[in-house]
Image (cartoon, rainbow, N blue to C red):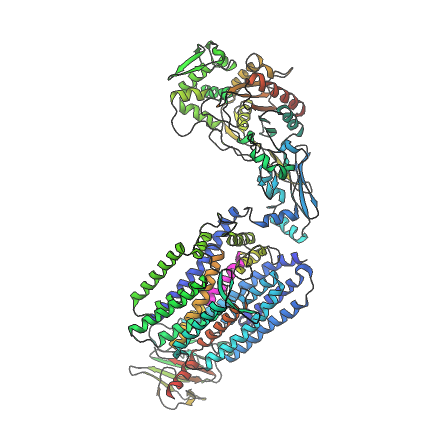
């Protein structure tokens, strides 16, 4: 072949490479990129689908309708009959403002996207009379309403769950908003200083205060660390003076006594004796510093950042102050873990997905998320928590004829008003429900403000949940 | 109705377009495989007729060796089953001075550029050689 | 025998089937009874079949090219018809006109001698066309490359593409080693590209550059010159991407369209959504929403094909272009006449590269430049010019006759 022919062949090869690269890029795009871009709000196709598919309903565990869509002259209207009550659990779905919570994470199911290919083809042939799937939540509407009423006028959050399965029975975050009137209220909502759009139950990060002592206590038991300390009412850790409530000296205390009276001095010493490594490892078993897999967006609870703690920080962290931050959901899971023999269940909000003909398409089975401690330790901690309610700081959570286990917390934070905490479960010998209550900047102790709320809900819950 | 048709047709369309591509590629492949014979600087014969208009097998290109015979009978270097071609029809010689063609007493004869050849003739690039119904172009490089 | 007949006739048969089936499908589209569709399908199938038949009779050259191109045009017409039946019908008319031009160019280029001698003629004609465009041109999509004559918009750059290829071929056929001749040649080439830049027809400018580089690579004896040209071209490209606004915009839209989604990146992201919506087999014709993409029937026809016929449909289009390019270079390899050899390379490169930059552009592999997808996109000028180019390529594929006649020409 002469040089011209050789060069022509080379140019031909160049063209093969150019056009071949188009094929490769196109395949790469289809396989790896498409999934990431398809739900961009500028992609009008998803809204097209929303126009002809009747968005599915969202139901509570007893199939009470919590959100539904109706067609009105070619347009769909989303109706939330309980207004503010589910603003954080169900969220909202608007073209202008996007979607949140269940409406967002279960959008595909609600629109019937991603059903089996066969039903998809069938749908297409049948044309436009399309129905999305319904989402059944683990929420119990009565308990949700109850929790909402008890939190009315306050700021904070309540999470009520089944400790043995991880089902969420109620999840309230205050303040909230009414998704029905969002179009009119949008400006007010986003300008509100109290941030009603934030779901405090899963993304609110609070200083835990004494409820964190459950974690320190677990770590002490797990590591067979020293359980006996002497409390003078205050202690000096590396130049920082840490006081007990009203500087009461508890004298000689063991782990049980320290928990019952919520002794800061003893617990900070426990933390220092344990060391950062061990305490952190237990906290991480409780899902601190880790993303909790959940049906709606949640944030990580924070035990420590990567930097090494000073002795002061460690002592303060051990009593749930300092840089430790938790979500109410996580604390409900801590209570559940102790109630469930030391196994933490994966929390979930969506029980099952049913199609428009009431057939179950998908169910969410309970799953163990983390083995935190053994049954023996869990039972010991439970017995101490019973004492906390019987004789300690949590007396106001006592229920007649039912043994309640609990732990209170009064968390100092940046402002001069403390967060009030209560976590617990009941009945103590065979736990059916676990709870976490936090009242943001309540300025009262957990025992006086959070415990009575928890008591009401636990009492009602035990009547409803078999 | 339209939806249903469209869904079925999308597979049929793609299948047909690919079959089409396959068909074209097959034709090109046959074309190339007959071209493959050209190696180095051998003189060769190139078919002028359209291949699919001839009712017998014939290649696009035949490379000429030192001595190459064309005929209908098996045993010739180049066998073409054209009824108008004799059992042993024509012979090519590749020599230092050039390439020569000689008709070996064929019934219908051999035409070089529309003229019937009698003797051994030297070929020039671009000559047309007609044997039976088949017409070749002689290429000299 | 029967099998062989079927195999050899298979592509034509399939082509006819695709057309009939698709028109049958479109007949049901949106449940409107439209007589024009019946006329269209008959017209289209008849045109393709008869042209192919005539071609087999009169041309001893390549007979794959026409089939491949008919398939591409058919896919285009189906898509355009589905997007807008009025445009679809017009496209069929343009297809017919294109075929007429195909035969006109085929005969003219074949019969008329002396194409290789009119070096200056090509230059003068193209410069006149450029100036006319500049003066009479209307601005569409930021590019001044249209002139209106009697209600029909014409894009002169489509014709200049062919003339440019003739110019290059003519230069290298009559090539002497005089230095000043070479500088004049380079000057002319750059004046072409400069004109296109002024008219903001970046896509066509890129095609001209590429064709120029390819021909230079194959025929230029001063090998260093080639590297200078390529380096120079790249530098100009990079500098202009920073300095000239309308080049910059395209780079921005390419680099991160998501950030500028409401403006610069809108078109390209809509195209990506469309391609994504199609998946591998597409939504089915008429069931997707390619109409969300602006300019979908011209520049973005490939995205529409990907949405409704799937990635496989898109890949098929690319493969058809690959066959087209392959045949084009094969023709160039087999052609003895230097002028037509270069013409074959030039035309093939033009068509192939144009397909590459627009497909690459709409899938965001390279920056988007607004050119049509040859034979597929809606547009009279583009379709007719592409068919004219194909007619010339058909002449170039007929080696024997050319050589004979050229020989005679020289003797007399």
- Which residue appears farthest toward the front when viewing the image? C135
Q: In which image quadrant can residue B115 be found?
A: bottom left
Across and down, in percent, residue C186 comes to 35, 69
Question: Which residue does the image show at 58% across and 41% down from the upper left?
Answer: A97
Q: Which of A405 and C277 is in front in this view?
A: C277
Q: Which quadrant: the N terminus of chain C? A: bottom right
- A332 with respect to A77 (left or right): left
Across and down, in percent, residue A266 comes to 45, 14
- A170 with respect to C302 (left or right): right
Q: Which of C133 and A5 is in front in this view?
A: C133
Q: Any magenta on residue A261?
A: no
Question: Which residue does the image show at 44% across and 73% down from the upper left?
Answer: C128
Q: In this view, does C246 lie above or below C383?
A: above
The secondary structure that most of the magenta stretch takes on is helix
User: Which residues are the magenta region?
Assistant: C311-324
Q: Can residue A122 be seen in this view?
A: yes
Q: In which image quadrant can residue A305 be found?
A: top left
Q: Is residue C224 above or below residue C97?
A: above
């Amino acid at each position: 072949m002469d040089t011209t022919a050789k060069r022509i062949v080379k140019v031909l090869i160049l063209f093969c490479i150019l056009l071949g690269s188009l094929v490769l890029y196109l395949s790469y795009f289809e396989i790896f990129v498409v999934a990431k871009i398809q739900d961009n709000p500028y992609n009008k196709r998803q809204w097209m689908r929303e126009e002809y598919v009747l968005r599915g309903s969202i139901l509570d565990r007893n199939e009470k309708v919590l959100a539904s869509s109706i067609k009105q002259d070619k347009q769909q209207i989303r109706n939330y009959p309980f207004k503010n009550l589910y603003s954080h659990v169900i969220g909202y779905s608007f073209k202008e403002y996007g979607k949140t919570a269940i409406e967002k994470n279960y959008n595909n199911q609600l629109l019937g996207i991603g059903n089996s290919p066969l039903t998809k083809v069938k749908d297409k042939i049948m044309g436009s009379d399309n129905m999305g799937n319904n989402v059944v939540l683990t929420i119990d509407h009565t308990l949700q309403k109850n929790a909402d009423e008890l939190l009315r006028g306050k700021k904070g959050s309540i999470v009520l769950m089944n400790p043995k399965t991880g089902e969420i029975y109620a999840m309230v975050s205050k303040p909230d908003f009414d998704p029905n009137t969002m179009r009119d209220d949008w400006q007010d909502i986003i300008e509100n200083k109290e941030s009603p759009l934030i779901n405090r139950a899963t993304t609110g990060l609070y200083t835990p205060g004494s409820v964190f002592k459950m974690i320190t206590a677990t770590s002490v038991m797990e590591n067979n660390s020293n359980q006996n300390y002497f409390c003078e009412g205050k202690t000096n850790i590396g130049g920082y003076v840490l006081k007990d409530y009203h500087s009461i000296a508890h004298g000689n205390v063991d782990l049980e006594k320290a928990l019952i009276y919520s002794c800061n001095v003893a617990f900070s010493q426990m933390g220092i004796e344990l060391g950062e490594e061990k305490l952190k490892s237990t906290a991480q078993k409780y899902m601190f510093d880790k993303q909790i897999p959940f049906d709606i967006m949640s944030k990580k609870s924070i035990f420590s950042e990567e930097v090494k703690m000073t002795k002061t920080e460690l002592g303060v962290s051990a009593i749930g102050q300092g840089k430790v931050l938790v979500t109410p959901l996580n604390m409900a899971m801590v209570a559940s873990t102790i109630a469930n023999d030391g196994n933490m269940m994966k929390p979930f909000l969506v029980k099952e997905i049913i199609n428009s003909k009431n057939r179950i398409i998908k169910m969410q089975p309970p799953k163990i998320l983390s083995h935190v401690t053994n049954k023996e330790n869990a039972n010991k901690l439970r017995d101490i928590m019973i004492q906390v309610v019987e004789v300690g700081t949590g007396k106001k959570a006592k229920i007649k004829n039912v043994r309640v286990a609990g732990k209170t917390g009064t968390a100092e934070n940046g402002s001069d008003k403390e967060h009030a905490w209560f976590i617990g479960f009941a009945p103590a010998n065979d736990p059916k429900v676990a709870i976490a209550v936090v009242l943001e900047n309540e300025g009262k102790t957990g025992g006086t403000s959070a415990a009575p709320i928890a008591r009401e809900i636990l009492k009602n819950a035990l009547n409803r949940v078999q | 109705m339209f939806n249903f048709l469209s869904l079925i047709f999308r597979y049929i369309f793609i299948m047909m377009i690919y079959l089409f591509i396959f068909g074209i590629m097959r034709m090109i492949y046959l074309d190339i495989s007959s071209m493959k014979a050209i190696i180095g600087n051998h003189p060769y014969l190139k078919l002028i007729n359209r291949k699919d208009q001839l009712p017998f097998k014939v290649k696009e290109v035949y490379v000429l060796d030192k001595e190459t015979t064309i005929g209908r009978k098996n045993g010739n270097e180049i066998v073409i089953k054209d009824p108008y071609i004799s059992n042993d029809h024509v012979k090519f010689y590749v020599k230092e001075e050039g390439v020569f063609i000689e008709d070996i007493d064929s019934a219908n004869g051999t035409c070089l550029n529309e003229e019937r050849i009698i003797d051994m003739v030297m070929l020039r690039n671009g000559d047309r050689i007609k044997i039976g119904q088949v017409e070749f172009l002689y290429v000299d490089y | 025998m029967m099998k062989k007949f079927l195999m050899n006739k298979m592509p034509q048969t399939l082509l006819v089937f695709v057309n009939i089936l698709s028109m049958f499908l479109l007949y049901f589209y949106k449940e409107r009874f439209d007589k024009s569709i019946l006329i269209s399908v008959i017209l289209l199938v008849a045109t393709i079949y008869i042209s192919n038949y005539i071609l087999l009779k009169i041309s001893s050259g390549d007979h794959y090219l026409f089939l491949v191109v008919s398939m591409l045009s058919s896919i285009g017409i189906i898509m355009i018809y589905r997007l807008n039946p009025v445009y679809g019908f017009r496209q069929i008319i343009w297809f017919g006109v294109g075929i007429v031009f195909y035969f006109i160019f085929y005969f003219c280029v074949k019969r008329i001698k002396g194409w290789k001698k009119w070096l200056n003629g090509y230059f003068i004609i193209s410069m006149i066309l450029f100036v006319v465009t500049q003066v009479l041109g209307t601005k569409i999509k930021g590019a001044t490359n249209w002139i209106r004559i009697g209600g029909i918009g014409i894009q002169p750059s489509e014709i200049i593409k062919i003339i440019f290829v003739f110019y290059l071929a003519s230069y290298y056929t009559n090539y002497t080693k005089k230095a000043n001749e070479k500088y004049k040649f380079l000057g002319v080439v750059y004046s072409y590209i400069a004109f296109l830049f002024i008219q903001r027809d970046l896509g066509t400018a890129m095609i001209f550059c590429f064709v120029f580089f390819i021909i230079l690579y194959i025929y230029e004896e001063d090998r260093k010159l080639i590297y200078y040209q390529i380096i120079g071209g790249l530098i100009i490209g990079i500098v202009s991407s920073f300095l000239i606004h309308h080049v910059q915009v395209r780079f921005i839209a390419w680099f991160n369209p998501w950030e500028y989604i409401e403006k610069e990146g809108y078109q390209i992201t809509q195209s990506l959504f469309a391609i994504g919506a199609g998946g591998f087999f597409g939504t089915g014709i008429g069931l997707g929403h390619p109409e969300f993409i602006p300019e979908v029937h011209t520049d973005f026809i490939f995205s529409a094909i990907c949405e409704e016929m799937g990635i496989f449909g898109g890949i098929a289009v690319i493969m058809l272009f690959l066959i087209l390019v392959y045949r084009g270079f094969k023709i160039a390899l087999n052609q003895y006449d230097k002028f037509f050899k270069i013409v074959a390379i030039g035309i093939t490169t033009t068509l192939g590269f144009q397909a590459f930059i627009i497909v690459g552009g709409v899938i965001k592999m390279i920056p988007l430049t607004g050119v049509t997808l040859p034979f597929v996109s809606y547009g009279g000028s583009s379709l007719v010019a592409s068919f004219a180019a194909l007619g010339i390529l058909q002449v170039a594929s007929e080696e024997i006759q050319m050589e004979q006649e050229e020989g005679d020409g020289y003797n007399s």
